[in-house]
Image: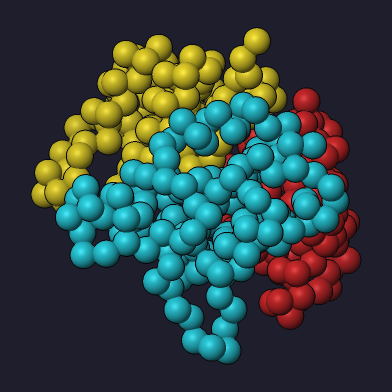
Amino acid sequence: MATLHTVNKTGQPLELCLRALNAGDSVLLLEEGVYALYEAGDVLSELLRHVAVHVLDADVLARGMTNRDNLDIDMIDYQGFVELTETNDKVVSWF
Amino acid sequence: MSQSICIISTQAPYRGQFAKEALDAALVSASYEIPTSLLLMGDGVYQVLEGQSPDQLGRKNIASMFQSLELYGIETVYIDGESLGERGIAPEQLLPLYTLLEGDAVASFLAQQDKVLSF
Amino acid sequence: MKYALAVYGAAGTGGQSSQTALSFARALLASGHEIIRVFFYQDGVHNASGLISPPQDEQNLPEQWQNLVKEHNIDAVVCIAAALRRGVVNAEEAQRYELPGSNLREGYELSGLGQLLEATVEADRFVTFGD
């Protein structure tokens, strides 16, 4: 049972998400969670070591951000968000 | 066969209505005879700290609401051990209604659930 | 697939979750999925209020939600306990509690948490939009 984890803030939601991951899960950073791109700390590196990480383009663009550090993160739109919910068996939201 | 539901509660007890509304959801879920579990993580672990007396806040005691879970067949509350450790809380300081999940146990517990509701 | 959504925030409650949920709901429908229920809980109940009037040059989220609900005939349920606590009521509740007025938008139903749990179990996918 693969799970999609959505994370809408850095800090506690991101840290708790890391603890809840299983191999094969996916993570989607959205809303304020996209700031993880500029805070590339231990938690994000740890996430990237374990699972596929995506960011929602609308939230990244809104904040004037880019994937400036060339992190192994895939930028997706809402259609991509829908597809992630199709391919995973369930969704867990961290906020 | 009914699906299992896990309710994750991650907010401190008197922050808005998060804790109360998560408990309400757990009670309603169990009363529908859905296999229901409640998992406290992050600041959510403060909800079951013993000795809460929120009278001066004009609020109901969140910890005592946990006592009613048993009546609905929720006999244990799952708690992320790491969240306790980070806050320097010993398990003895909690209501005696919990099951500690240490390390990878949180992830494997969640993997077994059909649906997850977060609060 | 059948989806159920829970929305916990609204414009003015601090987060962005109502907008995110709305965009996600539109994308779901565009992909041919079915939304069996949207459940408005916690501060999300404000999305169903007819008394929210943002400035002209800002978007009106409650209105956009209502348009989506109407256009796609979505089962939109507002948690009654959360709504009463926050001043979102229909005429019937206004009368029951002797309140000076009602504000629930057309197309929404006030009901209990059972509707959330039922939709969660019935849906193939359940997504929470927390604030």
Note whether B112 is above or below B84 in the view shown: above
Residue C96, horizontal then vertical, whole percent: 21, 48
Note whether B95 is above or below C131 in the view shown: above
The answer to whether B63 appears left or right of A65 in the picture is: left
Give the image quarter of residue A39. bottom right
Note whether A92 is above or below A73 in the view shown: above
The residue under the point 77% across, 31% down is: A89
**Which is more toward the observer, A79 or A1?**
A79
Give the image quarter of residue B46. top left
Residue C131, horizontal then vertical, whole percent: 52, 57
- Which colour style is shown? by chain
Question: Which residue is farthest bottom?
Answer: C57
Q: Quadrant of the N terminus of chain C?
A: top right
> Can see residue C74?
yes
Colour yellow maps to chain: B
Colour applied to chain C: cyan
Colour applied to chain A: red
The answer to whether A89 appears left or right of B55 in the picture is: right
Residue C22, horizontal then vertical, whole percent: 65, 60
**Which is more toward the observer, C108 or B54?**
C108
The residue under the point 88% across, 66% down is: A70
**Which is more toward the observer, A32 or C14?**
C14
The residue under the point 85% across, 51% down is: C31
